[in-house]
Amino acid sequence: MGSGFELPGEGSSGARPAFESVRRGYDPSEVDTFLSQVASSIQILETRLLQAARGTPDDVSDRLEKRFARVLAIQEQEAEVLLTEAHEEAVAMVAEAKREADRIRNDGRDAAERSVEEAHAFRERAEEEADHLRSDLAERRRGMIESLPQIRQRLLTFLQDVEATLGSIGDPGEAERSTSGEVVDDSSTT
């Protein structure tokens, strides 16, 4: 630079510039203090600039680590939200499945009870019908048994009438009379 002023880090001496004192102008101690502050600020900025240009591994590593930590934190929050939602959905599905199972069980139990009731009613009707048929058959049997002597008597009377009719038609021989007598005798034994 043309003024002979060197910035720290540019020259090899690193010494402060010296100014001549004059009667007019600014207070030299204030100017020195100000220049000292400017030089200090420039030195800090140069250090930061060099670090940024070099990308020190510690700095880059720290920044990456912080970014990665933020990404992980966000992903953990999202995962927790997803897990919470999945858990709530699973609880709801289990509750719905239990309600459906209860409904199916109750429907099955109701259907089974209706089937049992229908079976009992059918059995009772069948037993009543069987009892009715048995009593009807017993009554018919009794009636038939009671009417058997009358039927036998009618058959005997009929046979006698037939013999009498046959006898009036012609005089049957002794052989025929004995045969017709046997028929009458056979029917009386039955």
Image (cartoon, rainbow, N blue to C red):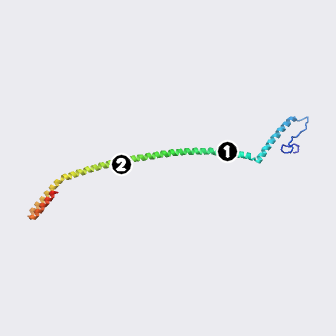
> With 121 as the anchor, is 65 left or right in this view?
right
The amino acid type of the residue labelled 2 equals Ala
On screen, residue 65 versus residue 29, left or right, reads left
Callouts 2 and 1 close, C-beta under 8 Å: no
- Tell me where residue 46 appears, x and y as whole percent: 80, 44
**Mark 1 closeness class: few <14, some 14–19, many ≥20 residues within 10 Å:** few
What residue is drawn where x is 37% and y is 47%? 116
Position in image of residue 35 (x %, y %):
84, 38
Which one is in front, 69 or 99?
A: 69
Task: State the separation of the CA atoms marked 2 and 1.
Answer: 73 Å
Query: Is residue 85 something one can see in this rendering?
Result: yes
Left or right for 154, reference 77 = left
x, y percentage for residue 97?
49, 46
Quarter occupied by residue 183: bottom left
Q: Earlier in the sequence, mark 2 or mark 1?
A: 1
Q: Is residue 165 above or below residue 50?
A: below
Secondary structure type for disc 2: helix
* Residue under the point 47% across and 46% down: 101
User: Could you say whether the residue bearing mark 1 is in a helix, strand or loop?
Assistant: helix
Query: Residue flagged by tag 1: what amino acid is it?
Result: Ala
Could you tell me if residue 172 is visible in this image? Answer: no
- Residue placed under numbered mark 1 in the picture: 69
Badge 2 local density, few (<14 within 10 Å), some, or many (20+)? few
Observer-side mark, 2 or 1, equals 1
Disc number placed over residue 119 in the picture, else none: 2
* Of the pair 38 and 51, the residue shown nearer to us: 51
- The percent coordinates of residue 115 (x first, y second) are 38, 48
